[in-house]
Each structure stands twice: as structure tokens, then as C-alpha cells.
Image: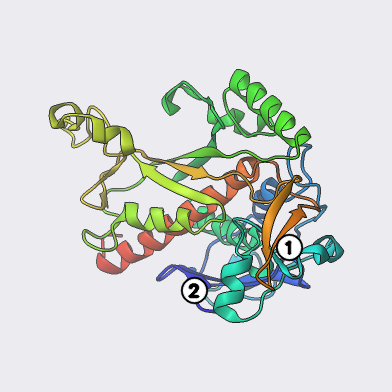
């Protein structure tokens, strides 16, 4: 299986399966001399881990990370950083009923057809549990570019949206509720919606908005490696993501150029920011903001038709511990992937110019 690495200079390779002994990763290219805050790294994992509230999967995993290399006396050494997160609460028997059945909208069918074998226990490598390794690397990337602020939050669940621009939100309130929505009134509606969906044995999707602030001018390349293209790839690599838009996004397609253009101030900033902080694929110093769409979780606790390995349509029902909505736990994943892109592009920029 190829495609287990992300990044050019700040590079993460992940390994492991949902119901294997452990998951983990290797970070290559992290500069030396970065003092790491291990409590902050663990806190990022705690934000993603299962069982943290009644509106997420009840799988109980401590998700404690152990570092094996690349760190000495609390500082990065510049050598590969190896880490592991042990799986301690697998219940593989929850998946024996789908050993020979391909669940609708899962990776079961495509994995087996591509590789000739699949790990049906929680989806194996296709499980979103793999993203815990990304969160570890993203937490380190955040500390490498600590002057750049990355905040993501739940901006919608189903048809319930925050009706305020991000500039009017208090990011310090993101962690004040289990849905990770900084608008308290909207958060209550979102939580109630997910609780109702869960009682029905169903799932629901939503969106996450991410804002990156204090970004220096000059990150990104102008052709194939545009900064927004790298962010788009990062977000679309996350399980259950179905869409990515930055700046004005699809709304910009409804506007005239005279309405959409960001006019300059004399200091090079712009009066508006419909460009989303990126022009010509290169950061312009304004806030970068984007939105990521997550589909409803494919496993529903309802009876559905499915295909089995004998080519028959059979009836199946989801079992086990699943998220009725992935969005609350995906917030730190979005932040982590954004941090990996920014850290990688900071190193690429330093490589280009002695000024950095």
C-alpha cells in the first residue's frame, strides 16, 4: 500500500490499523532545537480521542502517545521522530457479522478489490483511527510555527449553521462545549440535533471552518503546489471529507469581479478578504480561512441492503461503537493537517530565501 506519507520537507508517515496492536508515525524533517510541550501534544490527542462525550463513539481509548526517537531532554534533535499510540480497547467481535459483507459507502469493497484482502475489524487501515497519528504530528508542527495561530470549529451540523462571520466569534469558546462550536446558542441546537439522530440509529454530516492567522507573505508555489491546493489535498485526505472551499468558495461563483476583488490598502493589506489569504497560490499575509464538508458516518444502526462476497444482496445492520457525527472529533484533525501544510511550506520558504 502506497500513499502513507504526507509533506515534502516536514514529512509524516503513519502506520497501523484500527484493531491492531498500535498506530503511530515517523516525522522526518522536523528542525532541531524546538522545545516541545508534551502536555499540549497530549491535549490535542485528548480533543480527538473517542469516548469524550455522549455525542461521539463510546470506544474508550486513552490515546497516550509515546515518543521513541528524535527528542532529547525535551528538544527535537533534527532526526526522525518516531512515536506510537497503543490500541487498548478493541472489540473486534463487533465486526464479525461483516466479515463477508461489504458495508454501503465504506472502503470494504474497494479495498478488497484492490488488494485482494481486507481487515474487516473496524475497517483496518481505512479507519479514522489513523488520524490520531496526524494529530500528534500536527501538534508538533503547531509548536514549530507557534507564531501562526490555527483555529478550527464546527460551523454546521445538518441544516444548522452559525450565522455569524468568524471575525465575530470568540475562539476561546470553541472548547466550551462538546460540539466545539464557539457560538453557544447554535451549539445547543447542534447537540440536540445529534442526540436526536443518534436515538434514530442514524448519522448526520456537517462542516468545519478553519482560520489561520499571522501567516507570513510568501508561502506556497504559483503552479501545481499552490498553498490552497496543498490545504485542499490535506483536508480531502481526512476520512469522510466530501468538500473543501477557501475564501469566498462557491459563493464567489455568483459574484461579479467588481464585487469580488479585494482592493488594496497602502500597506499591502486588503480592504476585504474574499481571496481567503491566498492569491496566485501564495499567501498574502491576510487570514487564511476555509471550510471542510464531512459526510454522515456510513455505519448506521439500521437495517440496510448490502453486497456480500458471493455477489448476493443481503440485509445487514450496523453494530459496535460509532460516531453519530464525526465533526466534533474532526476539529483537531483539521487543525493538525493545516499545521502540517503550513510547517512544510515554512521550511520550503526558508530553503528558498536566506531572509527566512
Question: Is 288 above or below relative to 111?
Answer: above
Q: Which circle marks residue 3 in the picture?
A: 2
Who's the residue at 55% across and 45% down the image?
A: 295
Q: Is residue 72 visible?
A: no
Q: Residue furthest front?
A: 312
Q: Which of 334 and 201 is in front in this view?
A: 201
Question: Is 269 above or below relative to 67?
Answer: above
Q: Where is residue 9 in the image (x, y as percent from the top left)?
A: 41, 71
Q: Can residue 34 be seen in this view?
A: yes
Q: In this view, does 171 lie to the left or right of 281?
A: right
Q: Where is residue 29 in the image (x, y as percent from the top left)?
A: 47, 72
Who's the residue at 73% across and 29% down the image?
A: 196
Q: Where is residue 139 in the image (x, y as percent from the top left)?
A: 58, 55
Q: How crowded is mark 2: few (under 14 residues within 10 Å), some or many (20 or more)?
A: few
Q: Residues within 10 Å of mark 1 (few under 14, many from 20)?
A: many
Q: Residue furthest bottom?
A: 116
Which of the 4 quarters of the picture holds residue 190?
A: top right
Q: Which of 59 and 266 is in front in this view?
A: 59
Question: Is 256 above or below relative to 57?
Answer: above
Contact check, label 2 and label 1, Cβ < 8 Å:
no
Q: Disc 1 marks which residue?
A: 122
Q: Is residue 297 left or right of residue 223?
A: right
Q: Label 1's element?
A: loop
Question: Is 176 above or below relative to 1?
Answer: above
Q: Which is closer to the viewer, label 2 or label 1?
A: 1
Who's the residue at 64% across and 58% down the image?
A: 128
Q: Label 2's element?
A: loop
Q: Nearer the viewer, residue 120 or 216?
A: 120
2 or 1: tag closer to the N-terminus? 2
Amino acid at each position: 500500500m502506497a500513499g502513507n506519507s504526507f509533506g515534502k520537507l516536514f514529512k509524516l508517515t503513519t502506520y497501523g490499523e484500527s484493531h491492531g496492536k498500535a498506530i503511530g508515525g515517523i516525522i522526518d524533517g522536523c528542525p532541531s532545537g524546538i522545545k516541545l510541550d508534551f502536555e499540549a501534544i497530549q491535549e490535542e490527542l485528548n480533543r480527538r480521542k473517542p469516548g469524550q462525550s455522549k455525542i461521539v463513539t463510546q470506544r474508550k481509548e486513552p490515546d497516550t502517545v509515546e515518543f521513541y526517537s528524535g527528542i532529547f531532554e525535551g528538544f527535537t534533535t533534527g532526526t526522525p521522530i518516531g512515536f506510537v499510540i497503543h490500541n487498548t480497547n478493541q472489540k473486534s467481535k463487533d465486526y464479525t457479522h461483516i466479515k463477508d459483507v461489504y458495508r454501503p459507502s465504506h472502503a470494504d469493497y474497494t479495498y478488497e478489490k484492490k488488494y485482494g484482502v481486507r481487515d474487516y475489524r473496524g475497517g483496518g487501515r481505512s479507519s479514522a483511527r489513523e488520524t490520531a497519528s496526524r494529530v500528534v504530528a500536527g501538534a508538533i508542527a503547531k509548536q514549530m510555527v507557534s507564531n501562526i495561530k490555527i483555529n478550527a470549529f464546527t460551523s454546521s451540523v445538518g441544516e444548522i449553521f452559525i450565522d455569524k462571520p468568524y471575525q465575530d466569534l470568540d475562539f476561546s469558546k470553541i472548547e466550551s462545549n462538546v460540539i466545539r462550536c464557539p457560538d453557544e446558542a447554535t451549539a445547543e441546537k447542534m447537540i440536540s440535533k445529534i442526540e436526536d439522530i443518534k436515538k434514530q440509529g442514524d448519522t448526520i454530516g456537517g462542516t468545519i471552518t478553519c482560520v489561520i492567522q499571522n501567516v507570513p507573505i510568501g508561502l506556497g508555489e504559483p503552479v501545481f503546489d499552490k498553498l490552497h491546493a496543498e490545504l485542499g489535498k490535506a483536508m480531502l485526505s481526512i476520512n469522510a471529507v466530501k468538500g473543501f472551499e477557501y475564501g469566498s468558495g462557491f459563493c464567489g461563483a455568483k459574484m461579479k469581479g467588481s464585487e469580488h476583488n479585494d482592493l488594496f490598502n497602502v500597506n499591502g493589506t486588503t480592504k476585504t478578504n474574499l481571496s481567503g489569504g491566498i492569491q496566485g497560490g501564495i499567501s498574502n499575509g491576510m487570514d487564511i480561512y476555509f471550510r471542510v464538508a464531512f459526510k454522515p458516518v456510513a455505519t448506521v444502526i439500521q437495517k440496510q441492503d448490502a453486497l456480500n462476497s458471493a455477489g448476493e444482496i443481503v440485509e445487514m445492520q450496523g453494530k459496535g461503537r460509532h460516531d453519530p457525527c464525526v465533526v466534533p472529533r474532526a476539529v483537531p484533525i483539521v487543525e493538525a493537517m493545516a499545521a502540517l501544510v503550513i510547517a512544510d511550506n515554512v521550511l520550503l520558504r526558508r530553503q528558498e530565501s536566506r531572509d527566512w
